[in-house]
Amino acid sequence: MRERLVKYLYYYVAVIALLLVVRFATRGSEAELRDLSQQADTLTAQRSQLRRDIAGLESPARVREWAVTNKMQPFSTAETTTQPLEGLKPVPTPAAPAQKLEVSTQWR
C-alpha cells in the first residue's frame, strides 16, 4: 500500500512540474494571441470593405458607364444585318455492302 502511495506521489509531482514548465514556457503567448486576434479582426473588416468596393465597381451601371465613356455602342441601338442561311447539304446514302451476310446454323 505504501509503495503504491509513493508511486502516485511521484506521478503527482511530475505532473505538477510539467504543468509549471508549460505555464512558464507560454507566459508571453497571451498578449501575442490577443494581438493576432485583433489582426484577424482587422483583416476580416478590410476584406469585407474590399468586397463591397469590388461589388460597386462590377455593377451593371458602372460597366455601362465605362462602355459609354469608351465610345462603345449599346447592343439595342447597334445596326443589324442579316444574311440568308444556306440549306443543309444532303446526307449521302451509304453504299450497299459488296457481300451479303450469310449465317448458317448447325445442330449437333
Image (cartoon, rainbow, N blue to C red):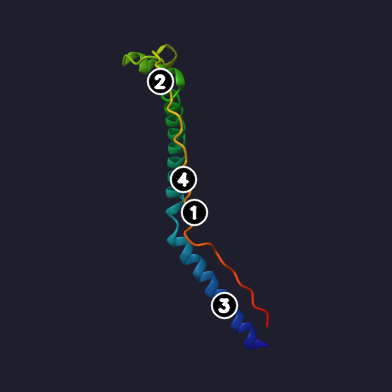
Q: Quadrant of the N terminus?
A: bottom right
Q: Residues within 10 Å of mark 3 (few under 14, many from 20)?
A: few
Query: Where does label 4 land, which residue?
Result: 34
Select label 2 or label 1 by which is in front: 1
Callouts 4 and 2 close, C-beta under 8 Å: no
Query: Where does label 3 land, which residue?
Result: 11
Q: Quick one: 102 or 29, which is closer to the camera?
A: 102
Point out the residue furthest to the top here. Answer: 77
- Specify whether 91 is left or right of 4: left
> What is the quadrant of residue 8 in the picture?
bottom right
Residue type at numbered disc 4 = Arg
Q: Where residue 96 is drawn, which disc sits there?
A: 1
Marks 3 and 2 sit apart, C-alpha to C-alpha, by 93 Å
The mark that comes first in sequence, 3 or 2, is 3
Give the structural element (helix, strand or loop) at label 1. Answer: loop
Residue type at numbered disc 2 = Gln
Marks 3 and 4 sit apart, C-alpha to C-alpha, by 34 Å
